């Protein structure tokens, strides 16, 4: 039978995308405000006739816009279809030894998936009791290192000294820092690029840049590193970024003022939400991301998750060891957070 | 050194994308006419605010539009970022045995690349002296079969009987028919879907549907087969089709009248071009695709390729065994073909 020769995996159930019109969606860390209006203009400027032609496989326009915005050179920029695509390509390129790669036990849930997919051996390192990484865990021989900073779903950011320490101990490995959430108050490893040619910094348009719907991710590294990454990507799929995402990405990254204003707005809402949650009996690691990873002193997270869902408020709950009493709450608009907080207050009182 | 542990490939040089304003581009098999105007409308209807949200990972809207257009069920449709992405996912899912997969020696140039990338053993089978596949070559034990129909770069299409014969001899393998060019006069394997549950038919929006710039590919199979493919895809990258490509794809596939008219126009131009090329001393396999694979009775293909390029007319030349005296000429607009033919006539006379 033909089914004997195929890869059979447990079907993954994608995160809830409730159709519910009145829902409050705080479960996938999307940005609560629309992207820059210049993105709309850029999309409307794409000509119908241009769509019949393949896009630029080197994606020079978008890479140059990113290079300009972050003051690096074109050859230091890689782009892909979301940071998932960027990281998967980086796994294929940089984690190519027989030695295990290292990443935290509580972290982004796709690292082990890609390692399995590409048959890359790996070891996970337990976060400490406060959900911090222990830098000493990353001193042993390895085939590469990856971690998010700030980490997800904890929201905890480590400082530049921490990252540099790991780089100093790993001259023989590529170290990937996944900065999906860095714009909300984290410390970017970008200033270390000049000193460490084995550092790859990955970012995304899906969070702070409000373009999850367009699927754009990118990475910075020294020219040699990015050269290897582009060579692998080109070798098996030359055309992945479509014309509209290139146009949208360029317009988005060029409107820096809008970007900074909107991010600041989310940070302000987050800080206010932290205080309110504390008053309601929640505690959480101090988040520098666009979500809060909160646990309540007396009410189980799973119960709150279900109660919130009944009230059309969607947050994220992971039924996994060590974190099964936490809710990951995305920072929405002020109005959305007010609804969430009002519901929690009433629910906790009435219990 | 970190470079010891990484994957180093020979950098691939993407096909020429000349910036030349007055060029005639007949080198990448793009469609010569714009997509349906309804695509533009659909893109303009995408709201700015929706872009901050992840797209539907199951891409139901586009899969349903394809299901309706081809009279199959939603669960029989898979979509991806171009047919390259669809086929790469199919390799990962269906070619998972230790036995070699089989494909023609002269064919789409990415099959061996994906096999190498995913460590899938493979054997190529030589086309006969007229560039036809020999069906007996595909009777031996194998881990899967893939071939384009019509084949590229030859343009030769095989009939339904040929495909059914291969399916009958391979109940234990998945057989992938890559129909990128089928709309220009080939025989689609779609009618065989009901009878053979190990058949996957792959098509694309990049050729006949004039949307190469949007990166959309799709595949049909029975529900079980498509279920396996979706499970693998979801397991490692849930969000790949962005909101604009979903919107553009739906609008495109729904405007069937425009599609058929435009394809007929290209076919008419192709048939006229065949006659004119013959009169100029060219011969070629009878193409049922949107290109002609032509060789001249006395002038080397490489010389013609260079001369055409000097005249800003770009065709494709492969410096590879067996086909290094052929040019692959995409069918452009009537005006473009007239310019090509006029240049060739003058060049061949003046030589």
Image (cartoon, coloured by chain):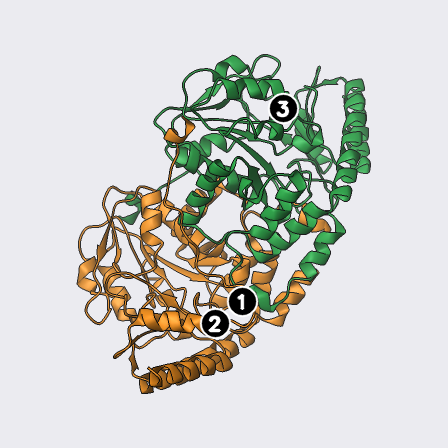
Chain colours: A orange, B green
Compared across the picture, whether B187 is left or right of B88 comes to: right
Residue receiving disc 1 = A20
Q: Are marks 3 and 2 on the same chain?
A: no
Viewer-nearest of labels 3 and 2? 2
* Circle 2 SS class: loop
Residue receiving disc 3 = B154
Tag 1, which chain?
A
Q: CA distance from mark 2 to mark 1?
A: 8 Å
Q: Nearer the viewer, residue B210 or B274?
A: B210
Residue receiving disc 2 = A312
Q: Are marks 2 and 1 in contact (CB under 8 Å)?
A: yes
* Circle 3 SS class: loop
* Circle 1 SS class: loop
Viewer-nearest of labels 1 and 3? 1
Q: Residues within 10 Å of mark 1 (few under 14, many from 20)?
A: few
In the displayed structure, B212 sits above or below A320; it is above
């Amino acid at each position: 039978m033909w089914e004997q020769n195929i890869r059979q995996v447990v079907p993954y159930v994608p995160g809830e995308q409730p159709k519910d019109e009145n829902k409050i969606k705080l479960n996938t860390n999307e940005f609560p405000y629309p992207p820059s209006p210049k993105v709309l203009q850029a999309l409307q400027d794409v000509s119908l006739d241009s769509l019949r032609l393949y896009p630029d496989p080197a994606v020079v326009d978008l890479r140059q816009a990113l290079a300009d915005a972050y003051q690096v050179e074109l050859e230091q920029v890689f782009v892909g279809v979301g940071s998932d695509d960027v990281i998967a390509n980086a796994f294929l390129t940089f984690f190519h030894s027989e030695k295990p790669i290292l990443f935290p036990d509580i972290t982004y849930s796709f690292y082990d998936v890609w390692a399995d997919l590409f048959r890359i051996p790996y070891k996970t390192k337990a976060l400490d009791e406060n959900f911090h990484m222990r830098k000493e865990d990353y001193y042993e021989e390895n085939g590469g290192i990856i971690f998010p900073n700030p980490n997800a779903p904890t929201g905890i950011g480590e400082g530049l000294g921490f990252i540099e320490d790991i780089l100093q101990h790993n001259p023989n490995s590529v170290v990937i820092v996944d900065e999906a959430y860095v714009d909300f108050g984290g410390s970017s490893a970008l200033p270390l690029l000049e000193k460490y040619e084995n550092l790859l910094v990955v970012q995304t348009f899906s969070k702070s840049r409000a373009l999850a719907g367009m699927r754009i991710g990118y990475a910075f590294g020294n020219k040699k590193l990015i050269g290897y990454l582009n060579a692998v990507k080109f070798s098996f799929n030359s055309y992945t970024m479509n014309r509209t995402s290139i146009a949208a990405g360029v317009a988005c990254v060029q409107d820096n003022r809008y970007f900074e204003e909107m991010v600041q707005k989310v940070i302000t809402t987050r800080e206010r939400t932290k205080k309110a949650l504390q008053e309601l009996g929640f505690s959480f690691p101090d988040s520098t991301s666009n979500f809060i990873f909160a646990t309540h002193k007396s009410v189980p997270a799973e119960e709150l998750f279900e109660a919130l869902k009944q009230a059309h408020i969607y947050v994220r709950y992971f039924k996994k060891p060590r974190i099964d009493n936490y809710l990951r709450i995305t920072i929405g608009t002020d109005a959305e957070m007010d609804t969430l907080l009002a519901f929690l207050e009433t629910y906790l009182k009435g219990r």
